[in-house]
Image (tube, rainbow, N blue to C red):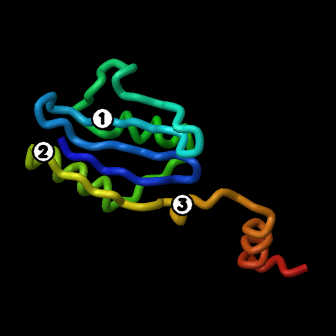
Amino acid sequence: MSQHTFQSHHYSVLCGWDAPLQGFFLVIEDSITGTLIYSNLNTTPSHPKSFDPFLTILNQYQITVHEQLLKALHEDQSNNIGNHVVDWGTFDHLNPKPTPSNNHLKRESNGNHS
């Protein structure tokens, strides 16, 4: 199976293509406590042929996935990849959590300099 890992805010995400089962998987853990947040093994179907259902799950936790990762997952499926591990680091820059300083910058960039 291919394994792609990344961090987003306080979540650790593991996803990939399971070649023997011919489907995708997704596991989300709280990176601070180690608590399991989501596992594809608790859903039906557990290994869907498309990653799209998992994009919905990731969106529920405000986890944004880099387009390059989605492309890699598609390639893993197309090539039936196994035994491949990639750590993508953090994706926090794709969906920063709003902070008072971020909101202030957004207002300024919109021309509201009052």
User: Residue beneath label 3, please?
Assistant: 92
Quick one: which residue is furthest to the front in this view?
33
**Spatial separation of the CA atoms under disc 2 and disc 3:** 28 Å
Q: Earlier in the sequence, mark 2 or mark 3?
A: 2
| Residue plotted at (53% across, 45% down) | 31
Q: Percent x, y for residue 65?
A: 42, 53
Going from N to C along the chain, the mark reached first, 2 or 1, is 1
Quadrant holding the N terminus: top left
11 to the left or right of 13? right
Callout 1, which amino acid?
Phe
Residue 34: x %, y % from top left: 52, 37
Provide the secondary structure element on which disc 2 rests: loop
**Quadrant position of residue 92:** bottom right
Badge 1 or badge 3: first in the primary sequence: 1
Farthest residue, direction right: 114
Which residue position is annotated with label 2?
A: 82
Tag 1 residue: 25
Q: Residue 13, how many percent across, how many down?
A: 42, 45
Q: Position of residue 3 (x, y in %)?
A: 26, 46
Please report the residue visible at 30 percent of the width from the left and 40 percent of the height from the top. Answer: 51
Residue at mark 2 to residue at mark 1: CA–CA distance? 13 Å
Mark 3 secondary-structure assignment: helix
Quadrant of the snapshot with the C terminus:
bottom right
Q: CA distance from mark 1 to mark 3?
A: 21 Å
* Front tag of 2 and 3: 2
Please name the amino acid that badge 2 sits on. Answer: Gly
Determine the secondary structure under disc 1. Answer: strand
Disc 3 residue type (three-letter): Asp
Q: In the rendered view, does 62 fall on the left or right side of 26?
A: right
